[in-house]
Amino acid sequence: MPFNDLGKNKALDGLDESVSGAITHIGVGNLTDPGTGANYGGTEATGGSPAYARQAVTWGAAASGQKANSGALTFDVPAGTYGFLLFFNHVSTNSNNFLGYAPINGTVKGFFSVDTTLTNDALFSVAHGLADGDRLQLFNVFAESLPTGLTEGTVYFVVSSTTNSFKVSLTSGGAAVDITAVAGGEGFFQKVIPETFASQGQITVAIGALVLDATGI
């Protein structure tokens, strides 16, 4: 059953940095799927001068089913391509300390359904706002399985997009992933806009830009 805003806010406030074991530090990771285990599954930034380090985060009180950072974050990163902000409850370790992640610059998101005829591998989402070449991840919803052929967390490229539909590929401009069974028939998509640095650089997160969102539950 759905939670009301009071329930959502209480759940989100349980992730506040003041709560033992909750989200105390934010890291930066590459474009590998971070995974959903207790340990981060990708490659976290490291090295550089000034050296990369996770940043302590402070959260504002949850309101209307959302909770956002109340202080700006700045990460010094070496040359590389980065896709995700990582949620940890420790300043440096990755042993049962990983709590989740958010895509960098990932403001475009929504739900999709699959073409049940399985003839053209299309995903339907009204006015989705995606364009060919965009990168995104797909996730299941309500514990349903994604359509067979799609893998949760994989970073795909958008191909063959129209106003209300799109397909996904493992390569830019490549062949669409073959969807072979409807399975749950629906899912959630989240756009990822990587940050690429040819040399030492910085990733900044403004106050209120990192949002924990429970409005979908």
Image: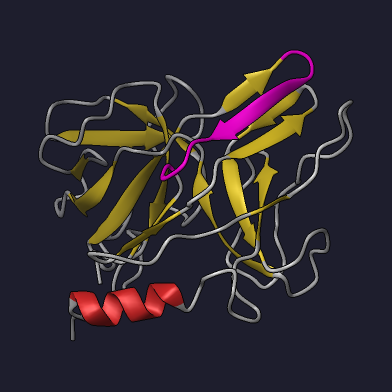
Residue 203 is one of the magenta-drawn residues: yes
- The residue drawn where x is 51% and y is 38% is 104
Quarter placement of the C terminus: bottom left
Quarter placement of the N terminus: bottom left
Q: Residue furthest top?
A: 198
- The residue drawn where x is 64% and y is 44% is 32
Residue 42 is one of the magenta-drawn residues: no
On the image, the x and y values in percent for residue 23 come to 60, 67
Residue 71 visible, this orientation:
yes
Q: Quadrant of residue 10?
A: bottom left
- The residue drawn where x is 30% and y is 38% is 108
Left or right placement of residue 5 versus residue 53 in this view: left
Q: Quadrant of residue 125?
A: top left
Placement of 160 over or under 97, stated as above or below: above
Placement of 56 over or under 74, stated as above or below: below
Left or right placement of residue 48 versus residue 216 in this view: right
Name the residue nearer the viewer: 35 or 186.
Answer: 35
Q: Which residues are magenta?
A: 198-209
Placement of 175 over or under 139, stated as above or below: above
On the image, the x and y values in percent for residue 66 come to 32, 61
Q: How many numbered marks are there?
A: 0
